[in-house]
Amino acid sequence: QVQLVESGGGLVQEGGSLRVSCLASGSKLATAAMGWYRQAPGKERELVATISSRGSTDYADSVKGRFTISKDNAKNTVYLQMDSLKSDDTAVYSCCAAAVATLLTRPPYWGQGTRVTVSS
């Protein structure tokens, strides 16, 4: 059984930085590719960043150059480093996982989400 548990959300001022983490347990094959979605109040869910089993990364245009996704395979943990945060980044950030990166558009596994609030 795959479980994803996020941590690290919180309140940060505009221009600041925050790192969220997601620990995956269960099948390593099923969680070989991981990513982060976010959903702000009144907005659609957005795929923010993904990382493949080989370490290839992809980002939404809205966060390119400010966010960095990384994965510690030994710990089966994925991180999202968020820098130069803006108030528009305020959202619930949810970790997701799949066997391959192409499935992250409809991931079978989800975390419970962690709230990030950026104050202006």
Image: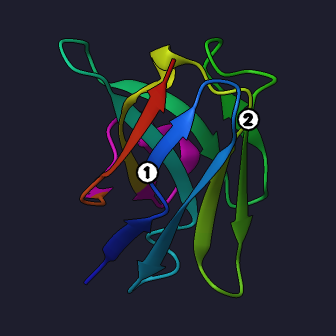
Check if residue 1 falls in the magenta segment: no
Q: Indicate left or right for 22 with 50 as reference.
A: left
Q: CA distance from mark 1 to mark 2?
A: 14 Å
Check if residue 101 falls in the magenta segment: yes
> Compared with residue 35, is residue 7 higher up or lower down, i.e. above or below?
below
> Compared with residue 101, is residue 74 higher up or lower down, i.e. above or below?
below
Q: Estimate the x, y position of residue 80 in percent, counting from the top left.
A: 63, 50
Q: What is the secondary structure assignment of the residue under circle 1?
A: strand
Which of 84 and 36 lies nearest the eye of the viewer?
84
Q: Which amino acid type corresponds to the residue marked 2 in the rendered image?
A: Asp
Which of 81 and 117 lies nearest the eye of the viewer?
117
Q: Quadrant for residue 56, please give it.
A: top right
Look at 31% across and 78% down and name the residue there.
Answer: 2
Q: Quadrant for residue 110, please give it.
A: bottom left
Look at 54% across and 40% down and name the residue there.
Answer: 12
Task: Please state the extent of the stretch shown in magenta in the rendering.
Answer: 97-109
Quadrant showing the N terminus: bottom left
Specify the color scheme: rainbow
Look at 76% across and 27% down and name the residue there.
Answer: 66
The residue carrying mark 2 is: 83
Q: Badges 1 and 2: C-beta atoms under 8 Å apart?
A: no
Q: Estimate the x, y position of residue 21 in percent, counting from the top left.
A: 54, 64
Within 10 Å of disc 2 (Cα), the crowding (few <14, some 14-19, many 20+) is: some
Q: Nearer the viewer, mark 1 or mark 2?
A: 1
The residue carrying mark 1 is: 10
Q: What is the secondary structure assignment of the residue under circle 2?
A: loop
Within 10 Å of disc 1 (Cα), the crowding (few <14, some 14-19, many 20+) is: some
Circle nearer the N terminus (1, 2) = 1
> Compared with residue 32, is residue 114 higher up or lower down, i.e. above or below?
above
